[in-house]
Amino acid sequence: MCDLNAFDGASTIRTKTMTWKEETVVESLIDKQSARYMPHVSEGFCLKAVELKLVSELMKNSRRSDRELAKALKVSQPTITRARGKLEKEGILREYTVIPDFVKLGFQLASFILVRLSDNLSAEELEKARQITINDMSERTPNEVVLFNRGMGGGYTGVLVSFHKNYSDYVKLVEKVKEYPFVDSSATFSFIVDLKDKTQYRYFTFSTLAKHVLTMLE
């Protein structure tokens, strides 16, 4: 069980007269004995407040060094280095990437393709279908698909999110998806976004989600 009432943060007991080594020792003790833990962020994981704040900071800008992140979070650099290592090891930090200007890269469309997956597949068949999709998407088709997951809504049970340089490429992907044996080819629906549209209510970003992540501390 995660302790929601445990003491949060070494910064309140650090003083300006502390040496770097003393700060490291103090924060290490707090890490082990009294750092605040969060509820399960994902199954089987509990995060300290400083770890969740670090995830938030990295979502806003993953280029920053541990020294810069430590300054932003008001903790020592070794604390950040340890936290980052733990988050990477446990798969919470899955990759470091960037969000480019997709239009300037040559992409014209983003699509959300809703599909109906076969509902009579066994657990073994579902796993086989998943492996087929993973291998096929990575080896035989362009890697324009950024998400393919099960879900529900409107009578559909799966969704693909993808980026395309033109409508023809989008059509090719739809036709490819319909070939999968676990997809009902007669039941697909697409929502297409024109990336060149000058009216954008919010451009694609993780910065706002990074702020929302911190509500887990409340």
Image (cartoon, rainbow, N blue to C red):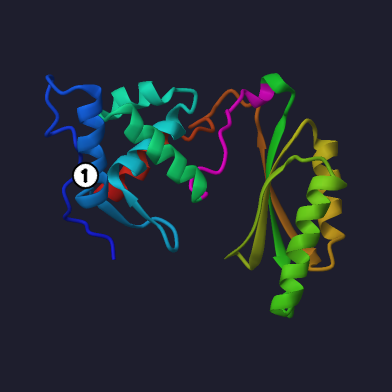
* Residue 157 in view (yes/no): yes
Residue 191 versus residue 152 in the image, above or below:
above
Q: Residue 118, located in which quarter of the rendered image?
A: bottom right
| Residue at 83% from the left image edge and 59% from the top image edge | 178
Disc 1 marks which amino acid?
Ile
Q: Tell me residue 10's x, y (percent).
A: 19, 37
Of residues 56 and 3, which is closer to you in this image?
3
- Secondary structure at numbered mark 1: helix
Residue stretch in magenta? 91-103
Q: Tell me residue 75's x, y (percent).
A: 26, 30
| Residue at 14% from the left image edge and 29% from the top image edge | 14
Residue 44 versus residue 100 in the image, above or below:
below
Asked if residue 77 lies left or right of residue 140, the reply is: left
Q: Tell me residue 133's x, y (percent).
A: 78, 57
> Tag 1: Cα neighbours inside 10 Å, few (<14), some, or many (≥20)?
some
Disc 1: which residue:
30
Q: Residue 172, located in which quarter of the rendered image?
A: top right
Q: Quadrant for the N terminus, please.
A: bottom left
The total of numbered circles placed on residues is 1
| Residue at 45% from the left image edge and 44% from the top image edge | 87
Of residues 186 and 66, which is closer to you in this image?
66
Q: Is residue 200 magenta?
A: no
Of residues 81 and 111, which is closer to you in this image?
81
